[in-house]
């Protein structure tokens, strides 16, 4: 059995109504083919799925509680980021071609299983904040690697910008317009 098969729900024999599933995602998930390029470096994720089977569709409600390891955007130190999310996915069955949307998935009526691995990977990716800095206060650098911050300061443009005559020439061009 392949690792990602544990995220499969065989829904063909399920009775109408609600069914609960739980999944655990660990670092091994991000070592699988297709998921290795993730910005998530480590993971401890608990996913609860409430599947509501109806005559012609499936409604899945996801409750995701996670602690994921990501790199700081400022100093590249790995840190743990707690995240939570609720997501909803509707699975319809149809033979007609249809463009899937973010929350609607269309499968062939002959499909009997639903593998949620790709969906969970995408949901976790969406939980990553745009800017990943471990401090609430973005100016606070107490949790960052001091050595890296010192090197950044050493090579920053601020120190070279003041002594470089090219900037003055560019400023003159800008003011002539």
Image (tube, helix red, strand yellow):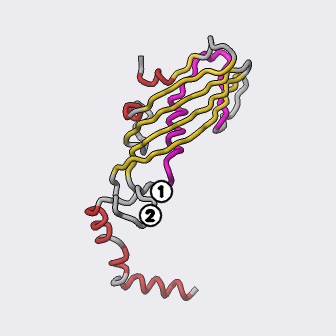
Vertical position of residue 40 compared to residue 3: above or below: below
Quadrant including the C terminus: bottom right
- Residue contact between numbered discs 1 and 2, judged by CB atoms under 8 Å: yes
Q: Note whether 155 is above or below 115 in the view shown.
A: below
Q: Quadrant of residue 67?
A: top left
> Magenta stretch: residue 120 in it?
yes
Q: Say few, some or many: other residues with alpha carbon within 10 Å of mark 1 (under 14 / 14 to 19 / 20 or more).
A: few
Q: Residue at x 46, y 22 (%)?
A: 6
SS label for mark 2? loop
Q: Secondary structure at mark 1?
A: loop
Q: Which mark is residue 131?
A: 1
Q: Which residues are magenta?
A: 103-130
Q: Is residue 12 magenta?
A: no
Q: Which mark is residue 138?
A: 2
* Among the two numbered marks 1 and 2 on one chain, the one whose residue lies closer to the N terminus: 1
Eyeballing the image, is 140 above or below 24?
A: below
Rendered view: 145 above or below 15: below
């Amino acid at each position: 059995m392949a690792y990602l098969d544990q995220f499969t729900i065989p829904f063909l024999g399920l009775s109408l109504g609600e069914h609960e599933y739980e999944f655990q995602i660990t670092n091994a998930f991000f070592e699988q083919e297709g998921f290795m390029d993730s910005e998530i470096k480590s993971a401890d994720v608990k996913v609860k799925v409430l599947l509501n089977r109806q005559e012609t569709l499936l409604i899945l409600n996801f409750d995701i509680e996670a602690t994921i390891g990501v790199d700081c955007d400022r100093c590249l130190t790995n840190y743990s980021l707690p995240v939570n999310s609720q997501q909803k996915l509707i699975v319809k069955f149809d033979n007609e071609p249809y463009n899937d949307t973010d929350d609607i998935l269309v499968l062939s009526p002959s499909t009997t299983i639903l593998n949620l691995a790709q969906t969970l990977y995408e949901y976790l990716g969406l939980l990553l904040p745009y800017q990943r800095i471990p401090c609430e206060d973005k100016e606070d650098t107490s949790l960052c690697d001091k050595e890296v911050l010192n090197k950044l300061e050493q090579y920053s443009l601020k120190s070279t910008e003041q002594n470089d005559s090219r900037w003055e020439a560019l400023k003159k061009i800008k003011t002539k317009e």
